[in-house]
Image (cartoon, rainbow, N blue to C red):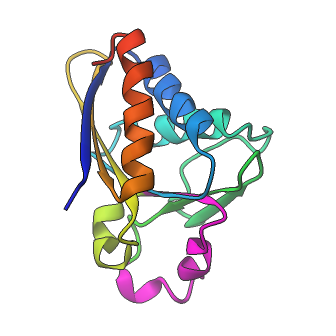
Amino acid sequence: MPTRYLHLTTRSSAETRALGAALGRLLQRGLVIALGGPLGGGKTRFVQGLAQGLEVVEPPYVTSPTYTLVHVHHGRLPLYHADAYRIGEADLEGIGFYDLLDGTAVVAVEWAARIAGQLPEERLEVTLVPLEADHRRVEMAAYGLDAALLLKDLEKIARERQWV
């Protein structure tokens, strides 16, 4: 059961990326971020911001790992960007997914609902829902103390940017 919720609205893809960057700057240790939402919902844009906040050196540019399944990015904390769209829970061992969950890196998983039963208990769930124009409703649910504290800090930033 989630310990904290945060519901925001971004008004452009730049704001969606900025939200990810704000979250990335707040991260002090590894955390699994389970991303959901429809195709074109802004999941990859959010992860691009997350990488920016984690001070990932580009290139490589953050793109969807749909066909490679996992992209590794190096920054202040390592960022593993995974995509579960084409895989199921049975495939996770074969791609080394469980090795990514050692707590040292940020693991952002697009289409995380497809492997929900294999995600760690402590995580942050982020669902991006397209609205009119380029607006997105961003629903965040924290599971565990670290994720809840993170959302508390992010809420302060979101209020300043009028995302709440």
Residue 34 lies, in percent from the top left, at: 39, 56
Compare residues 100 and 4 and report the one nearer the observer. 4
The residue depicted at 45 percent of the width and 53 percent of the height is 146
- Residue at point 47% right, 82% down? 92
- Tell which of 54 and 89 is nearer to you: 54
Name the spot of residue 106 as percent of width and height, x first: 59, 56
Is residue 106 shown in magenta?
yes
Q: Quadrant of the N terminus?
A: bottom left
78 w.r.t. 153: above or below? below
Highlighted range, magenta: 88-109
107 w.r.t. 19: above or below: below
Relative height, residue 98 to residue 142 (above, below):
below
Towards the viewer: 32 or 87: 32
> In the figure, residue 53 lies in which quadrant?
top right
Residue 18 % position (x, y): 52, 23
Q: Residue at x 45, y 20 (%)?
A: 157
> Residue at 64% across / 40% down in the picture?
51
Quadrant occupied by the C terminus: top left
Task: Give above or below for 43 relative to 36.
Answer: above
Q: Quick check: 100 left or right of 164?
A: right
Please tell me whether residue 41 belongs to the stretch shown in magenta: no
Residue 29 or 9: which is nearer the viewer?
Answer: 29
